[in-house]
Image (tube, rainbow, N blue to C red):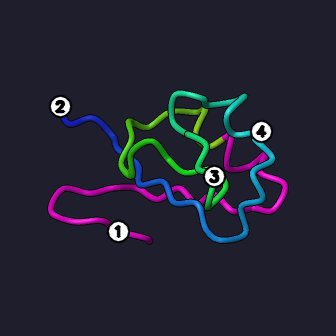
Amino acid sequence: MTRLRWTVRIDARCMGAGLCLGIAGESFRPNAEEGLRPRTVVVDAGVDVVDAAETCPVQAISVFVSRAGGLSED
C-alpha cells in the first residue's frame, strides 16, 4: 500500500505569524528572509498540516496531493 503524500507550499504572503509552527511544528521551519517554510516540500498526509493551512491568517499555505511520477495541483 502506498502512503498518501502531500506537497506543501508557502507563498510570499507569509508574515511569519508562527501559528503553523504551533500546530505542525515538525512540518515547518522559520526562515529569516522569507517568513516560514516547509521543512520538506513533500510530507506524509496528516491532519496537522491541513489544520495549519486553514489557520494561517493570510492563507499563505497550500496543500496539494502528491502523486507518483510528479506533483499535481488539482
- Taking the image as shown, residue 20 lies to the left or right of residue 49, namely right
Depth-wise, is mark 3 or mark 4 nearer the camera?
3
Which residue is tagged 1? 72
- Taking the image as shown, residue 2 lies to the left or right of residue 38, namely left
Depth-wise, is mark 3 or mark 1 nearer the camera?
3
Residue 61 vs residue 67, the one in the foreground:
61
Q: Residues under labels 2 and 3: Cα distance?
A: 39 Å
- Taking the image as shown, residue 14 lies to the left or right of residue 74, namely right
Quadrant of residue 4 in the image?
Answer: top left
N-terminal label among 3 and 4? 4
Q: Which amino acid type is shown beneath numbered disc 2?
A: Met
Depth-wise, is mark 2 or mark 3 nearer the camera?
3
Up-down relation of residue 63 to residue 24 (above or below): below
N-terminal label among 3 and 1? 3
Queried whether the magenta region covers residue 1, the answer comes back as no
Secondary structure of the residue carrying numbered label 3: loop
Q: Which amino acid type is shown beneath numbered disc 4?
A: Leu
* Label pair 1/4, CB-CB below 8 angstroms: no
- Taking the image as shown, residue 48 lies to the left or right of residue 44, namely right
Across and down, in percent, residue 74 comes to: 44, 71
On residue 32, the disc is 3
On residue 1, the disc is 2
